Image: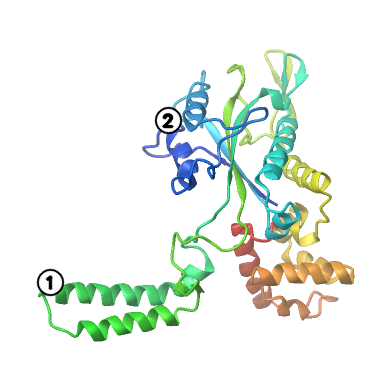
Amino acid sequence: MYITITAQNVKGNYAQSAADFVAYLEKENESKTIEEQEHFFNQFEEEISAEEVIREIDGNTAKLKKIEPKFYSITLNPGARELKAIQDSPEALKRYTREAMKEYAKAFNREINGRPINVDDIKYYGKVERQRTFKGTDKEIRENQPYATKILKLRKEIGSIEAGHQSGNIRKLSKEIQKLEREAPHQLNGKRVVRGMAKPGPQSHVHIIVSRRDVSNRFSLSPGSKHRASEVEMHGKSIKRGFDRDTFFKNSEKTFDTLFKYQRNYVETYTARKTFLKDPKLYFSIITKLPTNEKAVAFKLLQKSRVNTSLLSIPTNKLQLTMKAINQLKKGIGKAIESGSIGI
């Protein structure tokens, strides 16, 4: 499970309203029938309209300055193995989201009227998306790019010939384009993989838009707070403050495992991701020392994400991983993290 929290963009000429973000989340419904469409939901309701989401988020911004985020975006990105465990069920993802948002509320070190914050204080709207599309940062797009560049150049040349600006053999150029289309290393259903093309296989994930203010519009709840769980003296009173992301991420992961009786492998854990970012050598060493069955699953998950696990055969008893090997592994695992493909 790969979870992210992102603040509303407040740089440059940004929109104060949540309308643009909600429209982005609605994009997947454009080509679907009413029966096939996924609607917004919250802790207690289903089939909430986009108009209601915009109205509720935009109307819950009391005392926030123009340069402050009005909402945050949370994404819950299950890996392929997790989606298989829940049979790629949107209803299971909604159930999980509602439990994860309980953990989100608990991660605030704040009180309202003398009691800890709970999920009833959080104004949020979730939406299940069933597809992902290829982006410019994906390996498939990057490795197909030289072919795309040549194809674009040839198409421009054909256009120039057709416009009478130059002479040339259009038929020959078209054949060159067809040849390049076939030779591109990454293909999907007989076509070259390009940006915006839907990725194959289960790709379900959840987008959540959560208001910066609580449901009463009286208190600011920022998961982007620089302060972790702590207390500060203000006006002679001890005030709790902060949000513990580590607690939220770890408990959300445990929630999924408990709900669906999921047996999580080390490389799928939040702990593994933190270890990888802080101490790659330790991360690789832990993998090689896992019990045989767990190590086999770990290698399989990494290989599915196109990580070159042959590099892990380098002896680790003396941490003899070369910097070249570490950098290659970091690059591969970094891309897997970015795409959420193995959930680490």
Foreground pick, 306 / 190: 190
Corner quadrant of residue 225: top right
**Would you place residue 125 above or below residue 240 in this image?**
below
Q: Looking at the figure, which quarter contains the C terminus?
A: bottom right
Residue 46, image x and y in percent? 61, 31
Contact (Cβ within 8 Å) of mark 1 with mark 2: no
From the image, state whether disc 1 or disc 2 is nearer to you.
1
Residue 207, image x and y in percent? 58, 42
The alpha-carbon separation of the residues under discs 1 and 2 comes to: 45 Å
Q: Residue furthest right?
A: 291
The reply, left or right, for residue 72 in relation to residue 320 is left
The residue under the point 76% across, 15% down is 114
Total marks drawn?
Answer: 2
Three-letter amino acid code at the position of disc 1:
Ala
The residue under the point 77% across, 18% down is 115
The residue under the point 71% across, 44% down is 92
Task: Judge the density around disc 2: few (<14), some (14-19), many (≥20) Cα neighbours within 10 Å.
Answer: some
Mark 2 secondary-structure assignment = loop
Residue 134, image x and y in percent? 50, 61
The residue under the point 52% across, 29% down is 53
**Would you place residue 150 above or below residue 94 in this image?**
below
- Residue at mark 1: 163
Ranked by sequence position, the earlier of labels 1 and 2 is 2
Task: Judge the density around disc 1: few (<14), some (14-19), many (≥20) Cα neighbours within 10 Å.
Answer: few
The mark found on residue 287 in the picture is none
Q: How is the image coloured?
A: rainbow
Three-letter amino acid code at the position of disc 2:
Gln
- Residue at mark 2: 16
Foreground pick, 329 / 337: 337
Corner quadrant of residue 176: bottom left
Q: Residue furthest left?
A: 164
Mark 1 secondary-structure assignment = loop
